[in-house]
Image: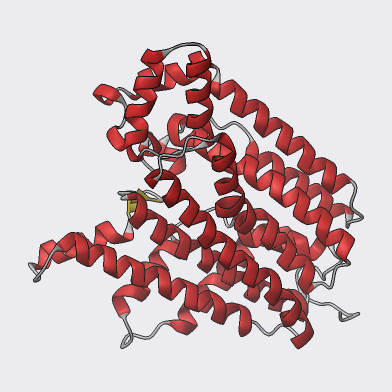
Amino acid sequence: MSLIAVGPIVDDDLPLRLAEALEEYLVQRRDADLAPELVAALTELVLGGGKRLRPTFAWWGWRAAGGAARGAEADAVLRALVSLELLQCCALVHDDVMDRSTARRGRPTAHQAFAARHRRERWAGDADHYGDCAAVLVGDLALAWADDALVTAGLPGPALVRAWRPWQAMRTEMMAGQHLDLLGGARRTESVEAGLRVARLKTAAYTVERPLHLGAAVADAPPNLIAALREYGRDIGVAFQLRDDLLGVFGDVRLTGKPVGEDLREGKRTPLMATALGLARAAGREDAVRVLRHCLEGGGPPGHDLADVRALLHELGAVAVIEKRIAALTASGLCALDRAVVLPIARDRLTDLAEQATARKW
């Protein structure tokens, strides 16, 4: 790494610098003659909100391993981190198609928007099928551009080689987790452990663990530091998904940008629902089992009364069990971070990020 770094310190304004890097990349790639509708849909999603968690964790993985806070190297890392936000958009668009979601970040999902245009323009064929196909292509474009963004960011050759390994693992883990989620619904899986495995692969790996791994690898971190950051990332990432599961039932649409209760309407087999079923059976509550099974079969809350299902999840003790697991995972993740030798500012920011990602928000 260079001994001389000039320019503003990225740590002080990371969200703005990430937003600038994303916008700059998308402007560079825009071509009015090449699938303008797909590019427009992707651009709207990328720039339309989001917490930028994945590039943020990657940046602090870089800094935890001693990566520069400013200068040419830091700028190249920022450009490389565009790839993580594009990978996230690929996952979101495809996930929305599979879940039949209607809203994302306060706007119609990509497949809904494309289907609406098909109807509005009175095009031939089935509007919903067209919307699904176009959205799949938006996700594919995001994935292709994610690879491009990493490779063309200007990282030194050895750093890019080191980054490629976690990048390869992250893409495959994300898709494996998505498939396990799909498979769990098809097989009517009700195991808590199966739900946690999906959370580890579908969310924890590509949201926290692998971004940290990627950032640290670019900085040429030693194996023991990478191992500690990955352990922190696995636990915080699963806790984050469990919190997201709770938000899917108890959250505020104004904060989440998604319809509340959507997971119940879709029959999502989350650890929350698996826990609730187990507790209902243990208590001999056949009435509760019937209500929960109705949700898991995609029927949504019986009578569309979300408040009753919320009350039931509390009454059975499922919410308390998940809250306890979130607290335990957060604590164990922070313990892993405490055992690592990292830059003090990176330790502080990663501690803050863990607390923000897993905190109760209703």
Question: In terms of image quadrants, where is residue 188?
Answer: top left
Q: Quadrant of the N terminus?
A: bottom right
Query: Quick one: 333 or 42, which is closer to the camera?
Result: 333
| Count of all numbered marks drawn on residues in the image | 0
Residue drawn at (32%, 27%) of the image: 301
Q: Is residue 158 left or right of residue 193?
A: right
Q: Is residue 206 left or right of residue 349?
A: left
Q: Is residue 236 visible?
A: yes
Query: Quick one: 47 or 242, which is closer to the camera?
Result: 242
Residue extending farthest top: 284
Residue drawn at (89%, 60%) of the image: 224
- Give the answer, above or below, for where 292 lies relative to 217: above
Residue drawn at (39%, 14%) of the image: 286
Q: Is residue 104 left or right of residue 208?
A: left
Measured from the top left, where is residue 146 in percent x and y?
54, 74
Question: In terms of image quadrants, where is residue 160?
Answer: bottom right
Residue drawn at (52%, 23%) of the image: 278
- Give the answer, above or below, for where 102 lies relative to 94: above
Q: Is residue 257 visible?
A: no
Measured from the top left, where is residue 107 in percent x and y?
33, 52
Measured from the top left, where is residue 39 in percent x and y?
37, 75
Measured from the top left, where is residue 276 in percent x and y?
50, 24
Query: Quick one: 319 or 286, which is closer to the camera?
Result: 286
Query: Quick one: 264 or 27, which is closer to the camera?
Result: 264
Colour scheme in use: secondary structure
